[in-house]
Image: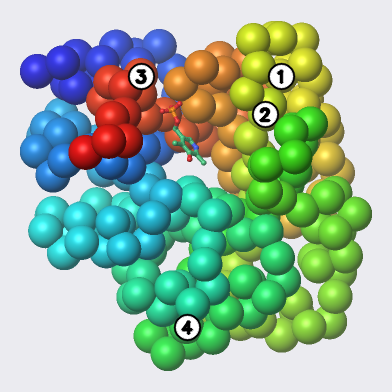
């Protein structure tokens, strides 16, 4: 029952406009079912194959969000059901998503991932690259994707001031950007979602604070 309790307390604490993505990567069908039975319908996964097998087993009114780094050759496996892709970090990937969405005669909603963290390891586009993509004629021609916002991950750091500044920089850029409003600003995880919300996040991706720590050795 711990999942239900964590989820209920978390949702109670959130402002109404903030959408919660329950990050269920590495977690079992049973854990997800418990969250589902508590009313949660949006789940996030970071591996395409894992998301596909969970999609196959779980209720079909779940909205599955892909939050991880994308391997282009695997986009095809989720194109028929994925509800939002958070981590689009290249124009090539966007084109592949468009191509696969077209095969299923649907439009796939995407967020462009901005690189806001100092760390080398974090994926993402620079603000300049994002502006360039959105302004390009080739982008205009992609009819089977729709960019509905941005996603960003702050540095993995206990320096709250740094995390705060990184989120803030993305919010400032997001507000200037010429995308259809209302749009999504996906930022914040278990350790930093409060700072993210303070800086204007309207979608948070929370895993361990709901499901407990992940055990990668399973
Ligand atoms: C794993 C993951 C999360 C959730 O992390 P927690 O610290 O468990 O809340 C959020 N976003 C992305 C992109 C992730 O990979």
Residue 165 showing in the rendered view: yes
Q: Is mark 3 within 8 Å of ligand 1?
A: yes
For the residue pair 101 and 28, the one nearer the viewer reads as: 28
Compared to residue 88, the image places residue 126 above or below, namely: above
* Residue 37 rendering spot, x and y as whole percentages: 11, 34
Q: Are the two marked residues, 3 and 2, in contact with CB atoms closer than 8 angstroms? A: no
* Residue 52 rendering spot, x and y as whole percentages: 27, 63
Q: Are the two marked residues, 1 and 2, in contact with CB atoms closer than 8 angstroms? A: yes
* Residue 160 rendering spot, x and y as whole percentages: 69, 9
* Other-residue count near label 3 (Cα within 10 Å), few / some / many at <14 / 14–19 / ≥20: some
Q: Are the two marked residues, 3 and 4, in contact with CB atoms closer than 8 angstroms? A: no
Labels 3 and 1: the sequence-earlier one: 1
Going 63% across and 72% down the picture, which residue do you hit?
Answer: 94
The Cα–Cα distance between marks 4 and 2, rounded to whole angstroms, is 30 Å
Labels 3 and 2: the sequence-earlier one: 2
Q: Quadrant of the N terminus?
A: top left
The Cα–Cα distance between marks 3 and 2, rounded to whole angstroms, is 17 Å
Relative placement, left or right, of 216 versus 199 is left
The residue singled out by tag 4 in the image is 100
Secondary structure, mark 1, is helix
The Cα–Cα distance between marks 3 and 1, rounded to whole angstroms, is 18 Å
């Amino acid at each position: 029952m711990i999942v239900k309790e964590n989820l209920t307390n978390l949702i109670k604490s959130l402002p109404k406009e903030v959408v919660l993505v329950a990050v269920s990567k590495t977690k079992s069908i049973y854990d997800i079912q418990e969250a589902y039975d508590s009313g949660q319908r949006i789940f996030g996964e970071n591996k395409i194959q894992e998301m596909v097998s969970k999609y196959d087993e779980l209720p079909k009114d779940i909205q599955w969000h892909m939050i991880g780094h994308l391997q282009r050759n695997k986009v095809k496996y989720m194109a028929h059901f994925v509800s939002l892709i958070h981590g689009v970090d290249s124009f090539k990937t966007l084109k592949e998503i468009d191509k696969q969405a077209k095969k299923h005669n649907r439009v796939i909603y995407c967020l462009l991932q901005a690189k806001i963290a100092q760390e080398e390891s974090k994926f993402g586009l620079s603000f300049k690259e994002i502006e360039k993509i959105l302004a390009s004629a080739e982008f205009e021609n992609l009819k089977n994707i729709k960019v509905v916002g941005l996603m960003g991950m702050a540095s993995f750091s206990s320096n709250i001031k740094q995390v705060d500044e990184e989120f803030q920089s993305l919010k400032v850029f997001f507000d200037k950007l010429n995308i259809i409003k209302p749009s999504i600003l996906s930022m914040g995880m278990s350790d930093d979602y409060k700072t993210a919300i303070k800086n204007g996040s309207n979608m948070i991706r929370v895993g361990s604070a709901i499901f407990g720590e992940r055990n990668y050795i399973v």
